[in-house]
Amino acid sequence: MLSVELLPVIQKAIAAQGADGWLLYDFRRTNPIATEMMGLEGLASRRVFAWVPVSGAPVAITHAIEQGEWVRWPSGWGRRVYASWRSFEAEVASLVAGKTVLMEYSPGDAVPVVDRVPAGIVDLVRASGATVRTSAELISQFFAAWTPAQYASHVRAAEIVARIARAAFPRAGAAVRAGTAMHEHELNDWIKAEFIANGLFTDHGPNVSASENAANPHYEPSADHPRALTMGDTILIDLWATEPDGGIYADQTWMGCIGEPSPKLRDVWTVVRDARDAAIELIRARVAAGQPVRGADADDAARGVIEKAGYGQYFTHRTGHSIDVRALHGSGPNLDNLETREERLLIPGVGFSIEPGVYLPGEIGVRSEVNAFIGADGLVITPVEIQRELFVV
């Protein structure tokens, strides 16, 4: 949230972008980034702006009947009040005319999680005499970056999640060996119970998928459509959980099989694992050398391995997603050059998943997922012990 203490840091970042200010806009929480940065207490049912100049005090543009929402706005900062659309547009123009402003706008909707401001508002700001550019890099730095405490929370959760995943495969194998029916949803329920027993929380999931169901990246097991685990099955376990009250999610995918894996499964697993490692090594090397690295670069590295192996058409999603304190799928940079054009840099403080996959419809799906954080000393991968070989149970 904008504060007197944080303001100089934000203004330094605005200057680094070569802009005159950051123009935050919200209406009925259509822009959660602006809502939180402005510290609004409730739902803004009228249009609001906050202008954060490269120097000087911020100024809010607020509606006459919604002054109570601004109780957190520092008294030394400006607050202009409008009632009519004419006064609203005049106030905007008085702040931004002739200036270069940063907004939650992504040209061509290249990065949807950044593209929060309606086209009509962008038109209005431009008509006021301003040049509009994206605030994407500011979002990474001030909305998506983790604090040290959040990082520590993530590391704790990651080790618990990994331990539960490793224990789930032998349970499936033991049930098949004993001739006792175990279904996807039952192993799913056991994982959720383990989360609770270990003090973790998840808002949905996890996902235990067998063979053909694993070929659907967003498959959800259900007691309404039970699928028994049997000899020869490929097992994909995707699970995510966090410490409650402000923790950062750990999000992992582990792969195994009941009985010896087929040559096809071994081949696909090797390709996916190597693609994951290619993305890790690219990011690690660039960060260590002090070189810029984009989310798109990491996606290209992983995707290149899979395409070279002949499975490119079966890798149908991005390589990874942002993880931040507000959401498992956060607002920071994704590892993506397939679904979107992720041009944002992977900067110190951001975390994300690395999870390439290959999905052969009606047959098998394979994904390997770890999490990554860019710290002061370089790239950190969680959990500490990542999967190298298939679990065979």
Image (cartoon, helix red, strand yellow):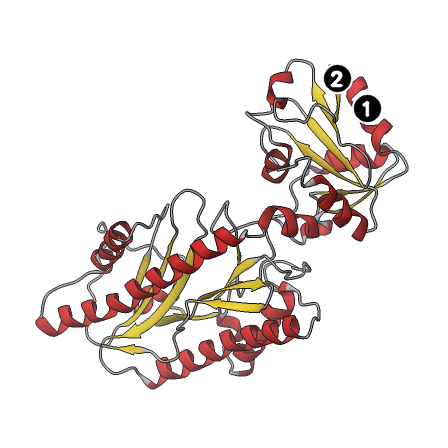
Report the disc number at residue 91: 1
Q: Amino acid at mark 2?
A: Tyr
For residue 14, above or below residue 288 = above
In the rendered image of this protein, does residue 376 appear above or below residue 197? below
Q: Is residue 383 visible?
A: yes
Position of 354 with respect to 22 (left or right) is: left
Q: Position of residue 197 (x, y in %)?
A: 24, 51
Under circle 2, the secondary element is strand
Earlier in the chain: of badge 1 and badge 2, it is 2
Along the line of sight, which residue is nearer the eye, 214 or 130?
Answer: 130
Q: Residue at x 39, y 68 (%)?
A: 361
Where is residue 181? Give x, y as percent.
13, 64
Q: Which residue is mark 2?
A: 82
| Crowd around label 1: few <14 · some 14–19 · many ≥20 (10 Å) | some
Q: Which residue is drawn at the image coordinates 62% and 60% (left, top)?
A: 348
Q: Amino acid at mark 1?
A: Glu
> Mark 1: which secondary structure?
helix
Q: Quadrant of the C terminus?
A: bottom left
